[in-house]
Image (cartoon, rainbow, N blue to C red):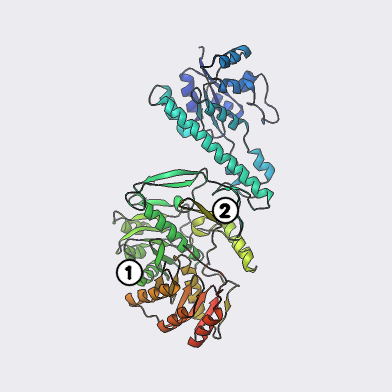
Amino acid sequence: MTRARRALLSVSDKTGIQKFGHSLYERGFEILSTGGTAHVLREAGLEVTDVAEVTGHSEIMDGRVKTLHPAIHGPLLARREVSGDMAALEERGYKTIDLVAVNLYPFRETVAQGDVPVVDAMTQVDIGGPTMIRAAAKNYEHVWVVIDPADYGRVIEALDGNGDSQGLRGELARKVFSHMSAYDAAVAGFLGEKDSGGTPASASIPGTGAGFSGEGTVPDRLELRYEVISELRYGENPDQAAAFYSPEGSALSGVSSLQKHHGKGLSYNNLLDLDGALCSLSPFALSPRPAVCIVKHTTPCGLAIGNSVEVAFLRALATDPVSAFGSVIAINRRVDVDGANAIRKLFVECVVAPGFTDGAMEVLTQKRNIRILSFPDHDEASPSIPISEDSLKVFDASLGRDRDAMRTARFLAAHGRDPEPLVVRGIYGGLLAQTPPLPPFFGIEDPEWRTVTAREATSGETEDLAFAWAAVYGVKSNAILLARGGATIGIGAGQMSRIDASRLAVQKAADAGLDLQGCVLASDAFFPFADGVEAAAAAGVRAIIQPGGSIRDKEVIAAADKAGIAMIFTGRRLFRH
C-alpha cells in the first residue's frame, strides 16, 4: 500500500505512542521514527521507517545528531501552496512530513532531583526535538505537531473529520511555543544557579531548577509560566472572573497539592484562606503537640496547642468564636472522632489536616458542604505536617550562625514544600517578588533572642512567648497577639496602627470572656512608642516578645521595666501584608 502521508514519531514519554502509531498507520500514514521510539513501535507490530533511511545518514555522537538534516526539516517547513518550496523538495527527492509527535528529554524532571552535576543535566537538554517541533509549529497550517500524549485522541478525531481541524492545529502550535519557552527558561535558570554558585541570575518562578536564593538576592529577569488547574465559579466577588493556576511543568505544591475528599469545589476565597491557614500552621510543623489554627479572611482568629486535636480546637475556638463562623481550619495531626465531633458543631468552610480516621470522615461528611482536604502522600502516623528532610537539614545547619546567615537559609517548611526561589505577588501594573519567609518554628530555641528588661521571663512565660511568636507569624500586619498556656486569647490583626491592634486584641479577649491577667504579648514589629507597652501592662500582660529596632527602644524598655514586664527582642520582623 502506498502511503500518501508521513508521520514522524520520536518521544521521550512513550505513553500511548503505540496506540497512536497504529491509529495513524490505519489512516494511511507512513511511520518514521528514531531509536527507542522505533523499537517500541516495532514491538507493537508496526512497520517503521528509520529516520536514517530518510536522511541517508546514520546517527552520530551517541544519538546527539540524528534528525538535524534537510531531509527532515525541508519536508517540515515546506509551504504546500508555494511552488518553489515543493519544487525544492522534488528536486532533492524529499517527501513532505505531515505530522510530528515529539516530547522532549526530561530536563526539568532531572534537575528537580537536586544536586545534579552540570554534565548530567546538559545531557537532558534536547536539541533535535525542539528544532522539529518549532519547525512543525511554524508550518502548522500544513503540519500537525503533537507534544502531549493527552492530545493524541483529539488529533485522530480531527483527522477523521470531526471538529475544527484548523483550530486544533493552531492550538497545538501555540502549545509548542509555550512549552519551549518554559523549557528554555528551566535550562537558563539551572545554568544561572550553577554559574553563580547557587544564586540564579534569572529564574522562572517557581519550580524550574533555578535554585534557592537568600535574602537580598533576586533574579534580574522573571519568566512566569503557569497553567490552569481549575476554572473557578468567580473571583473574590461574583462579578469577577477567576481561575487557579500552578507552575507549568512542576510538581504540584502548597495549596495546589492538597487532596480533596469531600465537599463542594474550592472557591477563590477558599484558596486564599487555605493558603493563610497553612502559612499560620507552618511554625507548628515540628510541634510535639497537636496544633489547630482557625483562619478567617486569611488571618488566624484562634490558634492553640493541646493534648489532643479536640482540646486544641476548643482552645483555639475560645479566642473568637464569632469570627470562627465560616472559617478554614488547619491541623497538624490526623483528625480523630473526638476532634471531628468538636469541629462539626461549627459551620466550617474547609478543614485541612495530614489525614482523618474512618470515624472522623464518617462524622464530618454528614455535613454536605464542608470541604475536607489532606496533605498529599503523608504518613498519617507522623506527628506533624510534612516537612522535607533536606529542608530540616538546611534549618538545622542555620542554627548557631548569625542572624543574616539564618535568613539566607530561609525556606518554606509549610505543607511539605521544598524551598522555592521567590514568592511572587501581583499588584496593579506589575509584580512584586521576594525570597520566602522562614517560619519561627515552635519548639526550637532561637539563639538570637535576648532579654532587654531588668526582669527575665519565667520558664512558663518563656514557653508562652515562644508560642505567641510562632502564632503571630500568620497574622496580618499590624499584628498583636495575646496568649497564655499555649493558646491565643486575643488577636488584633490588620490595623493601621499598632496601638489600635493592641486595643483590638484586648477587646477580643474581653468579648470572649477570657482573663488577660498573666498573659504574654507578641508583636510582629517593634513598638514605635511606649504607649503600646503601657496599654499592655494595664490589660494584665506580664511578658512581651517583639523584634526591637525602634529609635525609641530605650523608652519602650523603660516602660516595661516600670510595669515589671519581661521583654525579649528577637531581632526579626514578621510583617505579613
Residue type at mark 2?
Pro
Q: As displayed, is residue 53 above or below residue 491?
A: above
Residue type at mark 1?
Pro
Whole-number angstrom distance, CA of label 2 to CA of label 1: 38 Å
**SS for dot 2:** loop
**SS for dot 1:** loop
Can residue 356 be seen in this snapshot? no
Can residue 470 be seen in this snapshot? yes
Query: Residue lying furthest right in this view?
Result: 61
Residue 172 coordinates in the image, percent (x, y): 48, 31
Badge 2: few (under 14), some or many (20 or more) residues near its Cα, within 10 Å? many
Residue 327 coordinates in the image, percent (x, y): 35, 61
Numbered marks: total? 2
Residue 180 coordinates in the image, percent (x, y): 56, 37
Q: As displayed, is residue 162 above or below residue 434?
A: above
Nearest to viewer (mark 2 / mark 1): 2
Badge 1: few (under 14), some or many (20 or more) residues near its Cα, within 10 Å? some
Quadrant hosting residue 66: top right
Quadrant hosting residue 83: top right
Q: Which mark is residue 561?
A: none
Which of 398 and 493 lies nearest the eye of the viewer? 493
Q: Which mark is residue 321?
A: 1
Q: As displayed, is residue 288 above or below residue 56?
A: below
In the shown orientation, is residue 559 left or right of residue 66?
left
Q: Which mark is residue 421?
A: 2
Quadrant hosting residue 306: bottom left
In the shown orientation, is residue 199 left or right of residue 439?
right
Residue 129 coordinates in the image, percent (x, y): 59, 31
- Mark 2 or 1 closer to N-term? 1
Residue at image point 49% right, 78% down: 529
Q: As displayed, is residue 214 above or below residue 242?
A: below
